[in-house]
Image (spheres, grey):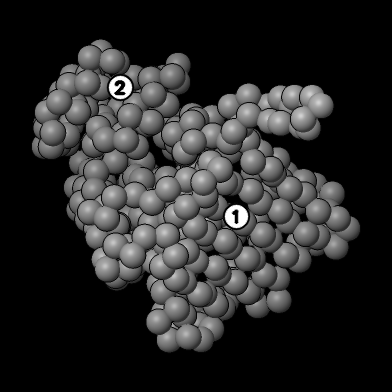
Amino acid sequence: MTIRFGLLGAGRIGKVHARAVTGNPKARLVAVADAFPKAADDIAAAYGCDVRTIDEILASSDIDAVVICTPTDTHADLIEAFSKAGKAIFCEKPVDLDVARVRACLKTVEQTGATLMVGFNRRFDPHFQAVRAAIDAGDIGEVEMVTIVSRDPGPPPVDYIKRSGGIFRDMTIHDFDMARFLLGEEIETVSAAASVLVDKAIGGAGDYDSASVILTTASGRHATISNSRRATYGYDQRIEVLGSKGSAAAENQRPVSIEIATAAGYTRPPLHDFFMTRYTEAYANEIKAFIDAVESKSKPTPSGQDGLAALVLAEAALKSVKEGRAVKVSE
């Protein structure tokens, strides 16, 4: 069975997903749509697909599934439209920046019985999956503490910051999902601190560029998240899980994993420069999981509810920063 895809959005993340879709033997990229004709034309030329409008893709009988990579404020409307059209949907995070809007959207998905998967690609990184496998195997005993370090090599443009929903909804949201993935329990309390240390213009746009978060479950397990929009040494992506019997950790990855030793000391190649290269395999695995779910008519993971849970944590973190206190997720 070949799943026929439409790609909505031909920007940076759209290009990543185009490569993942076309690299899967069970998938075919049929059409791409983008508000900027050149962006769509470039992907069409690279992968031999059509350029169509979103409305044309919606009505296309030769498309089974769509990958939504459009701006965040279009996600919920597109999910609803394509769920009603009977298409399977893969949507980049978040579903929306507003919790109530996400809930309404997921209600439509439930009513139509549509397949919806939300793009938290880090769950599909082989190194992070290996940590989860060690937890499941009981190798480190009961999970007690999780540490997540996620730091970008540099900040995005301020224009992007203004429409991103802020660091917690845009960047930390991946780490909130990873914390849930590793802790094995739902989070009850969020304590966060955030500052503007990298670029004053980010503060002028009403956002932060440096953040620390502590998440606590009902049993007392907790996860600590460290975020920064500036890591001069590369794309910093690390996790560690401490358990009752030991720990499991995934270190930073490099395009080439070698070490050179000379009289001057030990050197290693630099880290990956950003998510497009660091998570190439994760994106491919993610699309494979989506295709498998569509093929088997099973519920994919991460689901829309996983997307909602991460957004709720983002809201709680922002509230914690603004009010200077720990916030119950139930609030």
Q: Residues within 10 Å of mark 1 (few under 14, many from 20)?
A: some
Place of residue 261 in the rendered image (x, y in percent of width and height, measured from the top left):
79, 26
**What's the CA distance linking mark 2 and mark 1?**
34 Å
Which one is in front, 2 or 319? 319
Which one is in front, 187 or 15? 15
Count of marks placed on residues: 2
Can you say whether 45 is above or below 59 in the image? above
Badge nearest the viewer, 2 or 1? 1
Can you say whether 104 is above or below 48 in the image? below
Q: Are marks 2 and 1 in contact (CB under 8 Å)?
A: no
Q: For this view, does 134 lie left or right of residue 101?
A: right
Place of residue 20 in the rendered image (x, y in percent of width and height, measured from the top left):
42, 26
Which one is in front, 39 or 21? 39
- Mark number, residue 29: 2
Q: Residue at x 58, y 46 (%)?
A: 237
Q: Earlier in the sequence, mark 2 or mark 1?
A: 2
User: In terms of image quadrants, where is residue 104?
Assistant: bottom left
Q: Secondary structure at mark 2?
A: strand
Q: Give amino acid for label 2.
A: Leu
Can you identify the residue that label 1 sits on?
A: 149
State the quadrant of the N terminus: top left
Q: Residue at x 64, y 73 (%)?
A: 217
Place of residue 48 in the rendered image (x, y in percent of width and height, measured from the top left):
25, 13
Q: Give amino acid for label 1.
A: Val
Q: Residue at x 45, y 54 (%)?
A: 229
State the quadrant of the C terminus: bottom left
Q: For this view, does 66 lie left or right of residue 118?
A: left
